[in-house]
Amino acid sequence: MKIIDLSSTIENSPDATPDFLKIQVDYHSHEDGAKQVETLLNVPRRLFRNDEGWATETITKLGTHDATHVDAPWHYNSEIGGTRAQTIDELPLEWFFGDGVKLDMTHKDEGDPVTVRDIEKELERINYSIKPMDIVLIYTGRDRFYGQPDYIFKGCGVTAEATRWLFEQGVRVMGIDAWGWDVPLNVQAQQALEKDEKGIFWQAHQVDLPYSHMERLVNLGEVPSSGFKIACFPLKIKDGSAAPARVVAIIDE
């Protein structure tokens, strides 16, 4: 069995990262741990191996969407299909383990979203038929920009129609190796302002469907088109709109 890690590393963000996107991890040394033990339990450090206490870390800043994560329907709208949208802790765990299929969209330019026809052509190329509960991964190659200041503006995105088509095939979890599932925010904003109408900005998110998608995946280039499992269990955050996840592809060899 081979396991490919599709998750970004949770680490301190570069200084240029906007504050609302920053991740901050504080590291506490073995020396710090020894002092804690001495203060808490009056146990001198000489009684520990190498005079060292425990090493720990504190995540002081981590948004639920700031690393590889799974979005819940609640992120898109408060109501989906006329009923209250589900939060991340309410979604069935069965959604997050299943057969994976990778659709190669690396030929798509920035802001040129994946359409239904794009998906159909790629499925024809790889000779695969999507079945209910498949986990579909959109491979764009934009993970190479992860951590760079313009990463937020990289990606082709997926149309609302393509999202709906996948849902109609029985897919409930989809994923992409870019900052977002829709076209980049700057492209969406320009198009929405030019037309001054609803249904353009965030159209794939707000397609009014109870589905989940993963964003900011990495290493999809190492995954075959099919014949593998995906495990992508999100953290159980009460009332969360999303949660970080350790997403992996599992390949039998």
Image (tube, rainbow, N blue to C red):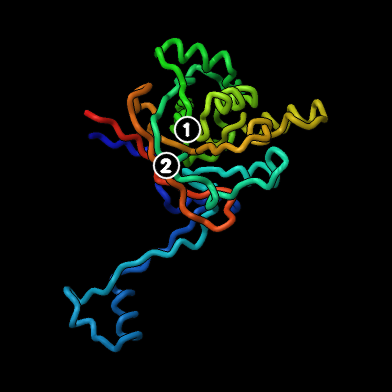
* Image mark for residue 204: none
Give the residue at x 47% y 43%.
68
Residue type, mark 1 in image = Asp
Residue 211 position by quadrant? top right
**Nearer the camera: disc 1 or disc 2:** 2
Q: Which residue does the numbered mark 2 point to in the structure image?
A: 232
> Reading the chain from its start, which is encountered first: label 1 or label 2?
1
Is residue 222 at all visible to an observer of this figure? Answer: no
In the displayed structure, 117 sits above or below 51; it is above
Is residue 248 at all visible to an observer of this figure? Answer: yes
Give the residue at x 78% y 32%.
198
Q: Position of residue 103 (x, y in %)?
A: 45, 21
Between the residue at mark 1 and the residue at mark 2, the CA separation in whole angstroms equals 14 Å
In the displayed structure, 181 sits above or below 114; it is below
Q: Which residue does the numbered mark 1 point to in the structure image?
A: 177
Is 132 on the left-hand or right-hand side of 2?
A: right
